[in-house]
Image (cartoon, rainbow, N blue to C red):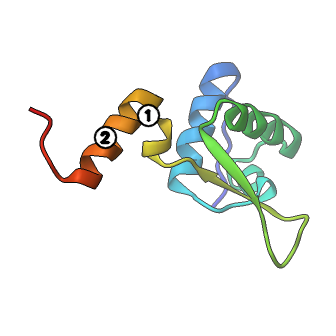
Amino acid sequence: MQMKAEIKGEIAEEYLYEFINVNRGLSIYEISERLGWNAEEVYILVKMLEEDGLIRITESEEEKRKRKVYPVGWKDLLPEDVKNGFLGKQKNNEPDW
């Protein structure tokens, strides 16, 4: 299913992030085809999201040129102090009170 969407700027970045969350593991080409966007524009937005730490790009083991796009897990988005506190509690299984 192809969607035609004329979205620009920060809204396009947010829309693409939500799209990647729902459609995990697509290539940049597949994303551009489904959204009806230019592949070069999708690539630029994907690189921006990757630099922001919101998504990761992995190379396919079968085809080195085919890269898949995935969202970063929610635990990885937490600040380090929160992450350490959260993960520390999970390891000890003790309440912090």
Sequence-wise, the earlier of marks 1 and 2 is: 1
Q: Is residue 1 left or right of residue 44?
A: left
Amino acid bearing label 1: Leu
Residue 36 in the image, given as x and y percentages of width and height? 74, 47
Instruction: State if disc 2 and disc 1 touch (CB < 8 Å).
Output: yes
Q: Is residue 42 left or right of residue 94?
A: right
Secondary structure of the residue carrying numbered label 1: loop
Q: Is residue 53 above or below residue 62?
A: above
Q: Seen from this angle, which residue lies furthest left?
A: 97
Residue lying at 70% horizontally and 20% vertically, measured from the top left: 9
Amino acid bearing label 2: Phe
Q: Is residue 11 above or below residue 31?
A: above
Question: Where is the C terminus found, in terms of image quarters?
Answer: top left
Residue lying at 50% horizontally and 42% vertically, measured from the top left: 76
Residue lying at 44% horizontally and 34% vertically, measured from the top left: 78
* Res 23 → quadrant: bottom right
Residue density around tag 2, few if under 14, some if 14–19, many if 20 or more, within 10 Å: few
Q: CA distance from mark 1 to mark 2?
A: 9 Å
Residue 40 in the image, given as x and y percentages of width and height? 88, 40
Q: Nearer the viewer, residue 79 or 6?
A: 79
Q: Is residue 45 above or below residue 63?
A: above
What residue does disc 2 label? Answer: 86
Q: Seen from this angle, which residue lies furthest top?
A: 9
Residue 22: assigned label: none
Secondary structure of the residue carrying numbered label 2: helix
Q: Is residue 96 left or right of residue 46?
A: left
The label nearer to you, 1 versus 2, is 2
* Res 29 → quadrant: bottom right
Question: Where is the N terminus found, in terms of image quarters?
Answer: bottom right
What residue does disc 1 label? Answer: 78
Q: Is residue 49 left or right of residue 21?
A: right
Residue 89 in the image, given as x and y percentages of width and height? 25, 45
